[in-house]
Amino acid sequence: MRMTVIGTGYVGVVHAATLADLGHEVLGADIDEERISALAAGIPPVYEPGLRELLQRTVASGRLRFTTDMARAARFAPVHFVCVGTPQLPGSKSADLRSVEAVVDALAPHLAPGDLIVGKSTVPVGTAARLAERLRRTAPGAGIAWNPEFLREGFAVRDSASPERIVVGVASGHDEAVLREVYAPMLRDGVPFFRTDPNTAELVKVASNSFLATKISFINAMAEVCDAAGADVLTLAEAVGADPRIGPRFLQPGLGFGGSCFPKDIRGFMARAEELGVGSAVAFLQEVDDINTRQRTRTVELARGLVGGAFDGTNVAVLGAAFKPDSDDVRDSPALAVSRAIRHEGARVRVHDPEALDNARGLAPELQYTLDVPKACEEADLVLHLTPWPEYQAIDPALLAAQVRRPTVVDARHALDAAMWRRAGWSLHAPGRPQPE
Ligand code: NAD
């Protein structure tokens, strides 16, 4: 089949390459010309494990091409996936839908009856219905469906090729049939397929993210209680998660969630629920958001205490800038938020990250950056482990101790081998875990 994918960020580029890998003929479109020329040469715009190989393979096959010409995209195929960003509107909790609307408006004049626009972006419930109304005027006979994306950054290629489920919100049997054909190889592999109406499909996405964010904030709230009570949140999480009704996944305490999805999705959900007159039904998400933000302040407070009550004149080394490992995404990264707060209070902050430094530099130019862990830790009064890249678990703490001024480390992600670090002479602090006597 022929199809286009509009918006070639984390979601779009992976979706386009996955569809081409399934055998479809795909045209990727974006307004960012630099991005499109790089993509045409097989250079991915973002870091995701396996993406470079997948992109190069599908571009070389001739089944994946790119353009900035939206009219060409509209005429290229009868199916158009919309994967543009829906960030939080500045000064508001609501989602900014201007990019989604711009794509629909750009495609509309060139669409033929029967053509289908398929939204993958995360949007407030009711968006597809509103866009359908708009299309009725600008492209009579064209349809709109919603097929939310569930991929996780860091696992995007794998998640996209083998999703846990495909959810399609469609207005007709014809639209369902089109989407079944797009995903036919996955359906043959047994991937569960949920056909629903567009409202429900849009809600499945924000409800999923809200549940996951709640689970993370729940265990981080338990970490706060453990700190006060002298209990151990890691053992607690393991024992609580052993109940199959609860399960161990997403029950890892730490620095909380960040990135371009959970924070803005739960806020957008609250705003939309308010509009629908059911704000109180999801008011608990405000608490989820507050607990999450508090993990950042708690980490800053712990760090401040460990350097003697004030950051002025101290050197702080930070391991990790991305909002999660295996990603170069620094949007609403807890690691960067903590680093910036500490810098703001007067510390010299040197940040290491294997993939996210370019993005971090753009967002937080006041911090110092290095690709070398020992250099980041040179003369440090405190080391903060904020993004659990696997390579940090392979650090030899004895060797690193020789670099620093004081061997004190905060493991905000509970990923370091605490006993090994302590044996190597480090004072290791992990929120929610008691300090050994
Ligand atoms: P992104 O910011 O990485 O990429 C968006 C792309 O859209 C950019 O390349 C931008 O240039 C392009 N774009 C913007 N306006 C355009 C226009 N008018 N025409 C054509 N292209 C345009 O965003 P993302 O992280 O890929 O997220 C996209 C959507 O998917 C969002 O709604 C997000 O909430 C959702 N989502 C993201 C993830 C994730 O892990 N990143 C997972 C699931 C769902």
Image (spheres, rainbow, N blue to C red):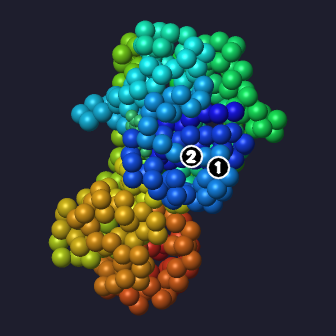
At a point 38% along the width and 32% down the height, the residue shown is: 99
Please tell me whether residue 68 is drawn above or below residue 301 in the rendered image: above
- Judged left or right of residue 179, residue 328 is left
Give the Cα separation between the discs numbered 2 and 1: 7 Å
At a point 54% along the width and 73% down the height, the residue shown is: 391
Residue 284 image-quadrant placement: top left
Where's residue 244, x and y in %? 72, 41
At a point 72% along the width and 43% down the height, the residue shown is: 22
Q: Marks 1 and 2: in contact by CB < 8 Å? A: yes
Residue 286 image-quadrant placement: top left
User: Tag 2's secondary structure?
Assistant: strand
Would you call the spot at circle 1 few (<14 residues within 10 Å), some (14-19), or many (20 or more)?
Answer: few
* Residue located beneath label 2 in the image: 65
Q: Between residues 91 and 74, which one lies in front from this camera angle? A: 74
Residue type beneath disc 2? Arg
Where's residue 264, x and y in %? 39, 37
The reply to whether residue 116 is visible in this rendering is yes
The reply to whether residue 127 is visible in this rendering is no
Where's residue 30, x and y in %? 44, 41
- Judged left or right of residue 277, residue 110 is right
* Residue located beneath label 1 in the image: 62
The CB of the residue at mark 1 lies under 8 Å from ligand 1: no
Quadrant of the frame with the N terminus: top right
At a point 30% along the width and 33% down the height, the residue shown is: 89
Q: How many marks?
A: 2
